[in-house]
């Protein structure tokens, strides 16, 4: 028997040795690999969203900040009967049924210990009520998060844009591997500066390593690494001026741009009507959104950068300079205006049916004689006009951190052949000569053009002053290759537009010394009055329905002898530029010059009472307090 | 040996028997039990509840049982071995009729104060019955085919009953234990060779009939075999246990993560962490050294049993002692192989360490018989 015992013992020993060998293999030879797997099992990395970079105006007034927002969250496993708990909560806090439905959906999907947001728009009072009633609300607790706030609401809606929760569409559109975007409801810039400077404003994620158990419950935090907050951005815009521009444009579908001609700083970029970007931060309601979409004044569009209009007579400076530079006319030559010019049997009318008689360059601008410019266009040709237009900043996309910046259109013969499949005809040139036809410009481009005309320098618009506390590189604008004498003549013409006899913008004079302005009106046709309408007695613009009336334009700079600011104003379907656009432009440029509401003494004495009424009627905000702009760690 | 022969030698009597107990064995068994308490304390997150306290009470009961059985002369136990075997069979039938279901099988009899697993009791009953049989059988007849049949029947009866529960692990343990007893008794090696050949045939049959109406195992049993063969194929399903178990073992390294520091068990990644998979917690927290130490303790227990058996000239005592030792060996070998991914998951506890009453009491009962054999061994004057 002992032989058998030995055999069996030997077998057992062999088996035990196999066990020990296996143990050694797993625990010693492969230990590192398995320890890694164990850590992967238990350690989860959670992202800590960084605080978004702040946006300031040129004086340091906060335009976009972060505020704590209060949320009410529910933990299913602590709540017991969820429906009953929510019903109790609804008795003390105003709850949106849609939010409740969303929360219930989310609760069904997630583990019972994960807090689910019931509402993220709770007020401090709601939070207090929840806290006081805590014993009756098991599993429900208030929570604090950060969300974007735009203290000036609609004033900067088109410049700043807004942030919103990242969507699947955003993820497909952005080639961005940032893990932050995977956080549910993480807010990213959707338009405007918020979208264009998204990378700077976002910052980088911090991480929190947590230990979880097999079902994902958080057991403890192992360590945390704070992220890098987003960079602060200081814009060139001026909060008070922007506020004034928006207030002045109220009631119109209009836009206005104010630029510092010395350095290209965009001081204001207004577009009316506006909207409240704060509504987008937590997701705008369908009703509110549809109201914005269906408004014929298109509040969501940033008309000053995205809108393009035929420049009308404001284009005449371009044509004049092109002709002067080309030498097809000098500053003395007079053209006779009989009220129309004839080309291949077709009549091109001057706005003044009776004609202007003998017209030289300065008078042509002052009285905006169309026939003079038909002649100029005929002489100089479209290619040279377009070249001058581009030199002055038209027909190109200016690089500003805004959404959908329009490049406008300065046509050439090749362009027409390619896009309209037709030869350029001389009639097209004549139309372009008075800023109609194919020519399209945005208010921003018109402001750049005016700044360049005022200084003779290639002023480039800019909107970012400092990024993360560091000045943006800035270059002195180079001189434009234009004969100063020619430029002078055009500038004189623009001055006469306001101050000359029979001046088109004579009613919009500034009488304060050293603050006089030079400008140019423009009225651009949306479409011709048809023969049928004419037969029905419609001859005046005011008789047409709103959406078919002419656009009113005005561009100006001031002071005329030492230019500081350039302004462009476009009032959609506003009628004549001298009536609808010039007074607005005057008020805006005066506000810029006086750095505040202009005194009545700047206006002609006969207009002061109406101006006072207008100023009193404006709903202006109290100027924002400048704050110390902090760097990236704000 | 007969009763008279015993009297010719010196066998301890009365209270003096206590001195003749195999105290080393008691010490080893207690050490293993203490390791069990520590691990149960750890997996409970540093608490005596819900496992350590009941386990301690059971072990105390088990020790008492062992001492009591050890004091009763071995010939008494031989005389009732047939009865014991029959009782265990009756209990197995009872479980079939009125047993409680747990984990997909009928395994438990509720006795009021504890839930008994008759299949555990059957292991000892079988060992006693076989030892008695081979003690009675003339040595010259051991390998005669006719005399092979009764022990085969003795093994088959409880095995088939257990298989019906169904409990594959325990039925394999019964077959292996019974086979080992026959081997130790001296049955011709030719039979074992034949069994191995037939076994291979059966395995082939098991797999070939899979999916047909005659399939021999339940689907979950096939599933366990599949999982064993390739645990990675279903890491969150059936293979989850084995994968997580290997991760726990492997991450222990040489010295482990330290007492109560095992992340796999503490964070609930391990299944059955207080019962069948408790070895993984030990290996994770005390590393290779801890795991190997437990293995060494187990081996020492076997060694002490074997020494005791070899020094005992009573054939029944020897066979009984070796049978208990083999049963014990099969317990820990299969459990450890299972958690280390060497054999499929079959639901065998780690002896004296896993939480559970029946296995512990039955094992202590078995060691009580070993003590009885040890104490009442004939000693020369």
Image (tube, rainbow, N blue to C red):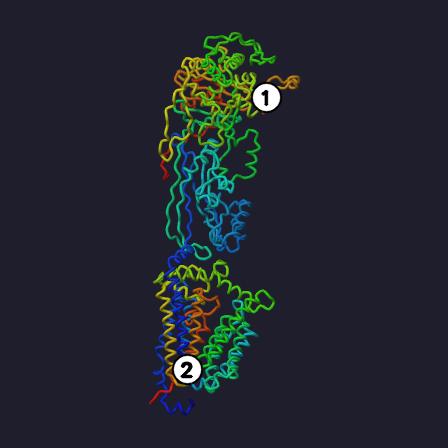
Q: Which mark is residue A527?
A: 1
* A548 or A345, nearer to the observer: A345
C-alpha gap between disc 2 and disc 1: 118 Å
Residue A436 drawn at (x, y percent): 54, 19
Is residue B288 shown above or below A628? below
Q: Is residue A172 left or right of residue A592?
A: right
Q: Which mark is residue A393?
A: none
* A613 or A283, nearer to the observer: A283
Is residue A526 shown above or below A342? below
Which quadrant of the view contains residue B100? Answer: bottom right
Residue B301 drawn at (x, y percent): 38, 75
Mark sitting earlier along the chain (2/1):
2
* B239 or B368, nearer to the observer: B239
SS for dot 1: loop
Q: Which mark is residue A1?
A: 2
Chain designation of label 1: A
Asked if one can make out residue A556 in the rendered structure from this viewpoint, the answer is yes
Instruction: Using a 10 Å C-alpha cutoff, classify the residue at mark 1 as few (fewer than 14 neighbours), some (14 to 19) or many (20 or more).
Output: few
- Quadrant of image for the C terminus of chain B: bottom left
Residue A285 drawn at (x, y percent): 54, 39
Q: How many marks?
A: 2
Is residue B153 shown above or below A301? below
């Amino acid at each position: 028997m002992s032989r058998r015992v030995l055999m069996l013992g030997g077998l057992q020993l062999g088996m035990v040795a196999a066990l020990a060998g296996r143990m050694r293999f797993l625990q010693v030879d492969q230990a590192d690999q398995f320890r890694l797997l164990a850590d992967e099992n238990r350690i989860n990395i959670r992202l800590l969203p960084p605080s978004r970079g702040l946006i300031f105006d040129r004086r340091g007034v906060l335009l976009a900040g972060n505020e704590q927002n209060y949320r009410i969250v529910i933990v299913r496993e602590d709540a017991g009967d969820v429906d009953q708990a929510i019903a109790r909560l609804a008795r003390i806090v105003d709850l949106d049924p849609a939010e409740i439905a969303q929360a219930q959906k989310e609760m069904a999907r997630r583990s019972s210990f994960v807090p689910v947001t019931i509402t993220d728009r709770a007020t401090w009072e709601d939070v207090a009520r929840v806290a006081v009633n805590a014993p009756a609300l098991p599993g429900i607790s208030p929570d604090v998060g950060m969300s974007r706030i735009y203290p000036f609401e609609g004033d900067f809606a088109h410049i700043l844009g807004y942030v919103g929760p990242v969507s699947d569409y955003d993820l497909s559109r952005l080639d961005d591997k940032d893990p932050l975007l995977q956080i549910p409801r993480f807010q990213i810039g959707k338009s405007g500066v918020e979208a264009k400077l998204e990378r700077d404003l976002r910052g980088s994620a911090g991480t929190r390593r947590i230990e979880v158990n097999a079902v994902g419950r958080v057991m403890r935090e192992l360590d945390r690494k704070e992220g890098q907050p987003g960079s602060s951005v200081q814009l060139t815009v001026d909060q008070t001026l922007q506020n004034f521009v928006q207030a002045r444009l109220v009631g119109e579908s209009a836009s206005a741009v104010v630029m510092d001609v010395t350095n290209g700083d965009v001081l204001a970029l207004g577009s009316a009507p506006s909207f409240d970007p704060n509504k987008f931060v937590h997701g705008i309601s369908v009703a509110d959104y549809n109201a914005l979409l269906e408004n014929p004044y298109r509040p969501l569009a940033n008309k000053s950068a995205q809108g393009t209009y035929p420049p009308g007579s404001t284009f005449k400076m371009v044509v004049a300079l092109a002709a002067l530079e080309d030498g097809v006319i000098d500053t003395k030559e007079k053209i006779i205006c009989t009220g129309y010019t004839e080309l291949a049997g077709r009549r091109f009318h001057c706005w003044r049916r009776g004609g202007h008689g003998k017209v030289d360059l300065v008078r042509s601008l002052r009285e905006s004689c169309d026939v003079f410019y038909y002649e100029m266009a005929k002489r100089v040709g479209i290619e040279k006009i377009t070249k001058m237009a581009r030199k002055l900043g038209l027909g190109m996309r200016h690089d500003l951190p805004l959404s959908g910046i329009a490049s406008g259109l300065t046509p050439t013969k090749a362009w027409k052949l390619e896009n309209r499949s037709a030869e350029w005809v001389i009639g097209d040139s004549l139309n372009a000569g008075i800023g109609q036809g194919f020519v399209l410009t945005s208010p921003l481009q018109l402001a750049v053009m005016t700044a360049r005309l005022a200084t003779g320098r290639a002023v480039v618009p800019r909107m970012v002053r400092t990024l993360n506390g560091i000045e943006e590189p800035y270059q002195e604008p180079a001189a434009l290759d234009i004969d100063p004498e020619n430029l002078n003549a055009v500038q004189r013409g623009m001055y006469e537009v306001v101050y000359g006899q029979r001046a088109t913008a004579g009613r919009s004079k500034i009488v304060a010394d050293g603050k006089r302005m030079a400008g140019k009106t423009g009225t651009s046709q949306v479409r011709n009055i048809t023969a049928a309408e004419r037969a029905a007695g419609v001859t005046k613009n005011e008789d047409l329905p709103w959406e078919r009336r002419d656009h009113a334009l005005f561009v100006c700079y001031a002071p005329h002898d030492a230019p500081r600011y350039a302004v462009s104003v476009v009032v959609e379907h506003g009628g004549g530029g001298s009536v609808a656009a010039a007074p607005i432009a005057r008020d805006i440029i005066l506000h810029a010059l006086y750095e505040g509401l202009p005194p009545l003494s700047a206006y002609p004495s006969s207009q002061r009472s109406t101006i006072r009424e207008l100023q009193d009627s404006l709903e202006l905000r109290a100027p924002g307090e400048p704050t110390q702009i902090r760097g990236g760690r704000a | 040996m007969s009763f008279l022969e015993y009297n010719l030698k010196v066998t301890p009597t009365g209270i003096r028997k206590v001195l003749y107990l195999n105290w080393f064995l008691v010490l080893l068994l207690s050490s293993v039990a203490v390791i069990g308490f520590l691990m149960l304390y750890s997996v409970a997150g540093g608490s005596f509840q819900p496992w350590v306290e009941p386990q301690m009470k059971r072990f105390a009961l088990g020790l008492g049982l062992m001492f009591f059985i050890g004091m009763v002369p071995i010939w008494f136990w031989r005389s009732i071995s047939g009865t014991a075997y029959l009782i265990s069979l009756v209990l197995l039938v009872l479980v079939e009729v009125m047993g409680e279901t747990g984990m997909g099988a009928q395994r438990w009899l509720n006795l009021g104060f504890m839930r008994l697993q008759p299949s555990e009791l059957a292991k000892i009953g079988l060992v006693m019955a076989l030892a008695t049989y081979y003690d009675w059988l003339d040595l010259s007849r051991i390998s005669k085919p006719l005399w092979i049949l009764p022990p085969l029947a003795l093994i088959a009866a409880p095995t088939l009953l257990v298989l019906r529960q169904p409990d594959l692990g325990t039925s394999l343990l019964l077959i292996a234990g019974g086979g080992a007893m026959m081997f130790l008794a001296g049955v011709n090696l030719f039979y074992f060779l034949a069994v191995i050949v037939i076994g291979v045939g059966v395995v082939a049959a098991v797999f070939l009939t899979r999916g047909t109406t005659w399939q021999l195992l339940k689907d979950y049993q096939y599933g366990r075999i599949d999982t064993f063969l390739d645990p990675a194929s279903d890491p969150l399903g059936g293979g989850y246990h084995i994968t997580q178990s290997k991760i726990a073992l492997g991450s222990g390294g040489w010295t482990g993560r330290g007492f109560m520091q095992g992340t796999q068990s503490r964070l609930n990644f391990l299944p059955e962490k207080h019962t069948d998979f408790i070895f993984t917690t030990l290996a994770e927290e005390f590393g290779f050294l801890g795991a190997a130490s437990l293995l060494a303790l187990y081996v020492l227990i076997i060694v002490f049993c074997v020494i005791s058996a070899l020094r005992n000239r009573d054939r029944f005592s020897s066979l009984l002692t070796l049978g208990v030792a083999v049963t014990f060996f099969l317990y820990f070998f299969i459990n450890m192989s299972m958690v280390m991914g060497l054999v499929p998951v079959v639901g065998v506890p780690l002896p004296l360490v896993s939480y559970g009453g029946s296995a512990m009491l039955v094992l202590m009962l078995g060691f009580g018989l070993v003590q009885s054999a040890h104490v009442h061994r004939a000693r020369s004057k």
